[in-house]
Image (cartoon, rainbow, N blue to C red):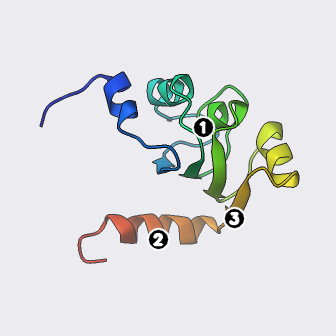
Amino acid sequence: MKAVAVEEAVAMIPAGASVMVGGFMGIGTPERLLDEMVRQQKTGLSAICNDAALPGKGVGKLFDASLVSRLTATHVGLNPKAQQQMLTNEIKVDLVPCSAASKSTRRAASPTG
């Protein structure tokens, strides 16, 4: 497998893509990847993550730049920008229980389903 630069990897992500991002409240997220998604203005994203993090941290950067159109998470978290976007219907939000989110992720990653 050939390694690629983060700029090249993000260039392969189309607008409107679904992206699953690890981490909790901005801790443990791929910061360089998220920074590049913001730089390249990847719009209309469906974000699948634990939470919306905080402004300027983790996936919170995607909400700062208004790049998310749908959020699937266990909670919106402490991100007032994501909360405002949810309340003004700028983003659709699917809240799922933490146990259901982990089971769905495990099931999707398993070759046997």
Q: In the visual, does 2 lie left or right of 80?
A: left
- The image position of residue 7, as x and y in percent, is 37, 23
Q: Quadrant of residue 97?
A: bottom right
Q: Residue at x 44, y 64 (%)?
A: 105
Q: Compared to 66, does 102 lie above or below? A: below
Q: Mark 3 is on which residue type?
A: Leu
Q: Residue at x 58, y 40 (%)?
A: 43
Q: Give 85 or 80, whichever is nearer the viewer.
A: 85
Mark before the other along the chain sequence, 1 or 3: 1
Residue 78 visible in the picture: no
Secondary element at tag 1: loop
- The image position of residue 17, as x and y in percent, is 48, 50
Using the image, tell me which numbered label, if any, was put on residue 14: none
Q: Which residue is mark 2?
A: 103
Using the image, tell me which numbered label, if any, was put on residue 59: 1
Where the C terminus falls, by quadrant? bottom left
Q: How many numbered tags mark residues here?
A: 3
Instruction: Look at discs 2 and 3 and give the one toward the viewer.
Output: 3
Q: Which residue is mark 3?
A: 95
> Marks 2 and 1, Cα distance to the nearest angstrom?
21 Å
Q: Quadrant of residue 72?
A: bottom right
Instruction: Look at discs 2 and 1 and give the one toward the viewer.
Output: 1
Residue 108 visible in the picture: yes
Q: Are marks 2 and 3 in contact (CB under 8 Å)?
A: no
Q: Mark 2 is on which residue type?
A: Lys
Q: Compared to 105, does 42 lie above or below? A: above
Q: In the visual, does 113 lie left or right of 75?
A: left
Secondary element at tag 2: helix
